Image (tube, rainbow, N blue to C red):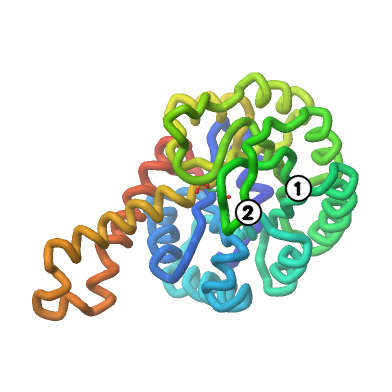
Amino acid sequence: MPLVNAKEMLTKAKAGHYAVGQFNINNLEWTKAILLTAQELKSPVILGVSEGAGKYMCGYKTVVGMVTAMIEELNITVPVALHLDHGSYEGAKKCIEAGFSSIMFDGSHYPIEENFAKTKELVETCNKLGLSIEAEVGSIGGEEDGVVGMGECADPEECKMIADLGVTMLAAGIGNIHGVYPENWPGLSFETLDAIQAKTGDMPLVLHGGTGIPDDMIKKAIALGVSKINVNTECQLVFAEATRKYIEEGKDKQGKGFDPRKLLAPGTEAIKAKVKEKMEIFGSVGKA
Ligand code: 13P
């Protein structure tokens, strides 16, 4: 199946009270692990690409080439969206040109009027081309690709303003942050989420910073209208841990254990297990 935009999968998720995972990719192993798991579990999936990861993978065109070819060669039949994560205005335009099926324009650091104007323009372009578009209100805390946010709670009125522009899905800050949550993290603000959902109705809401959010909070967020959950750091942590274990056990020194296809295999398997765990919690298994 060719790449699809994220609209249909998220509309179904919102109506069916489950969420589709966005798993960020960093290289071939990540992409392969996520696609194979989605196929095995018959789950729709969104592959997220940050601007930094896009650069690392030699540019957006390389990413589109790798992902589309892999879908074909691995016979992936579940719906897959290729989505720019936290895109700048320029980055969004580049991904549209390169063949992404979905983009996020993160204008949360602009004054709301400028966020509004830029999002509006990109919504028009995406609508014309049949792409889905995610916008953000209230910056998500933590650090991602050198961009540091404060973990705000979005203003529900501003969320409505941006949702009314016709975006496909809306990321709203509800006290969530990227990366590992600190010990003293007070948790998600369900009051804010409830108020945002009341203002934005059927709009699928996006929860960033999926790493380390306790399962009961994830389930409550889904019940309150979250239909897309982004996970990145957790896959990186399990990949690093499995790779470290392999090396610490001296396996790279046994036979041809240094072969990258062997060296990177435990990390790849660890990503598969993590993605499976998340899809089960999100409720997207069997929904493709
Ligand atoms: P984590 O790295 O905290 O899982 O967040 C991922 C994310 O929100 C990508 O946009």
Judge whether 99 appears above or below 200 on screen. below
**Disc 2 target residue:** 147
State yes or no: discs 1 and 2 in contact (Cβ < 8 Å): yes
* Distance of label 1 from label 2 (alpha carbons): 10 Å
Where, quadrant-wise, is the N terminus in this rendering? bottom right
Q: Which of marks 1 and 2 is nearer the N terminus?
A: 1
Secondary structure under badge 2? strand
**Residue at 88% from the left image edge and 49% from the top image edge:** 114
Q: Does the residue labelled 1 lie within 8 Å of ligand 1?
A: no
Judge whether 23 appears above or below 252 on screen. above
Would you identify the image quadrant in which residue 153 lies?
Answer: top right
Q: Where is residue 100 in the image (x, y as percent from the top left)?
A: 66, 66
Q: Where is residue 159 in the image (x, y as percent from the top left)?
A: 78, 34
Q: Position of residue 25 (x, y in %)?
A: 49, 62
- Is 280 situated left or right of 87 in this image? left
**Disc 1 target residue:** 109
Would you identify the image quadrant in which residue 281 lies?
Answer: top left
The disc labelled 1 sits on which kind of residue? His
The disc labelled 2 sits on which kind of residue? Val
Q: Where is residue 15 in the image (x, y as percent from the top left)?
A: 63, 32
- Is 90 situated left or right of 218 in this image? right
